[in-house]
Amino acid sequence: MSRVVKKTEKPKTTFITNAQEFGKVIQYKRTSLNLTIKQMADFSQLNERTISNIEKGNERVNLGNALKVAHLLGVIISFEE
């Protein structure tokens, strides 16, 4: 039996300025796709703790791992001048 994924509220910000806001976006995208943390971990080939730490806004998460998860979820990271 698969677990029910509780949808999180869409973040109110359009500009990410810190790890906590990034984590909220990641969590929102994951839950909107009905993915559990375990499913996201399996899909990204990372462990559940890493996914959880990204979503909590832990600043010690490897940037490459955070960007990988964002990419897999379709979160676009852009640069503007």
Image: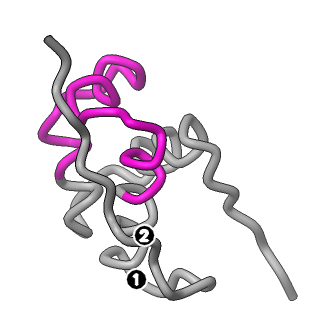
Q: Secondary structure at mark 2?
A: helix
In contact (CB < 8 Å): disc 2 and disc 1: yes
Residue 21 at what x, y percent from top left? Answer: 39, 78
Q: How many marks?
A: 2
Q: Is residue 25 magenta?
A: no
Q: What residue would you read off at disc 1?
A: 18
**Mark 2 = which residue?**
22
Q: Position of residue 72 (x, y in %)?
A: 56, 35
Q: Magenta span covers which residues?
A: 28-52
Q: Is residue 39 depicted above or below 59 in this figure?
A: above
Q: Position of residue 36 (x, y in %)?
A: 26, 33
Dot label at residue 62? none
**Which colour scheme appears in the figure?**
one colour
Image side of residue 22 versus residue 75, left or right: left
In the rendered view of the protein, which quadrant contains the C terminus? bottom right
Image quadrant in which you'd find residue 79: bottom right
* Element under disc 1: loop
Of residues 49 and 3, the one nearer the viewer is 3
Give the spatial CA distance, label 2 vs label 1: 6 Å
Quadrant location, the N terminus: top left
Residue at the extreme top of the image, as rendered: 1
The kind of secondary structure the magenta stretch mainly shows is: helix
Question: How would you rate the neighbour count of disc 2 (Cα within 10 Å): few for under 14, some for 14-19, many for 20 or more?
Answer: many
Residue 52 versus residue 9 in the image, above or below? above
Residue shown at 16% from the left, 27% from the top = 3
Compared across the picture, whether 78 is left or right of 5 comes to right
Please identify the residue farthest to the right as the structure is shown: 81
Q: Amino acid at mark 2?
A: Phe
Q: Residue at x 69, y 57 (%)?
A: 76
Toward which corner of the image does residue 53 lie, by quadrant? Answer: bottom left
Q: Amino acid at mark 1?
A: Asn
